[in-house]
């Protein structure tokens, strides 16, 4: 594992670390770079595409917008450099295609092991009934 110390995405240090990443990709003859989240999409994907010789997967596994508005454009830009964009559900693929403009033939879905309904809030009465049946307190303590 290699740690790339990056104080932020907009610094000279980031460019130096990007060149270090590209050098490692080439010298280690890396075949695939998989950027796993928005920050690694923005940092690693362009450097790998410009200076590496590997196949590049970026990822989108979320429905919501980026934590900061400025990251949205940078992340969209990173998708242009990726060979494929990995998603974890059809609905995220839809968001990626409609909101981010990524071509469907560039999107690869590897679904979650859970149905999308598993991520929906549970009715409060049903939640309490399940917790009682399992012998767990009906109230959540922090």
Image (tube, rainbow, N blue to C red):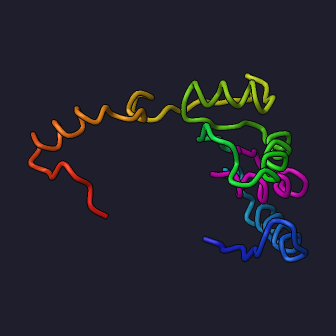
| Residue depicted at x 73% and y 65% | 28
- Residue range in magenta is 35-58
Answer above or below: position of 135 versus 14.
Answer: above
**Within the image, what quadrant is residue 47 found in?**
bottom right
Q: Residue 34 location in percent, x, y? A: 66, 50
**Within the image, what quadrant is residue 9 found in?**
bottom right
Q: Residue 123 location in percent, x, y? A: 31, 31
Asked if the stretch drawn in magenta spans residue 62, the answer is no
Q: Residue 29 location in percent, x, y? A: 75, 59
Is residue 12 left or right of 4 when viewed as pictured? Answer: right
Report the number of numbered marks: 0
| Residue depicted at x 61% and y 37% | 63
55 or 37, which is in the foreground? 37
Answer above or below: position of 71 versus 118.
Answer: below
Q: Residue 62 location in percent, x, y? A: 60, 41
Asked if the stretch drawn in magenta spans residue 38, the answer is yes
| Residue depicted at x 77% and y 58% | 44
Identify the image quadrant of the C terminus: bottom left
């Amino acid at each position: 594992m290699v740690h790339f110390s990056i104080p932020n995405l907009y610094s000279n240090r980031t460019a130096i670390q990007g060149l270090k990443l590209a050098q490692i990709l080439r010298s280690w003859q890396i075949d695939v770079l998989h950027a796993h989240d928005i920050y690694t999409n923005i940092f690693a994907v362009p450097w790998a595409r410009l200076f590496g010789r590997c196949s590049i997967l970026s990822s989108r596994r979320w429905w919501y917008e980026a934590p900061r508005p400025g990251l949205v454009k940078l992340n969209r830009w990173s998708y242009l450099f990726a060979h494929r964009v990995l998603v974890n559900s059809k609905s995220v693929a839809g968001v990626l295609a409609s909101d981010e403009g990524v071509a469907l033939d560039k999107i690869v879905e590897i679904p979650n092991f859970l149905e999308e309904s598993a991520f929906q809030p549970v009715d409060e009465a049903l939640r309490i009934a399940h917790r009682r049946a399992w012998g767990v307190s009906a109230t959540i303590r922090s």
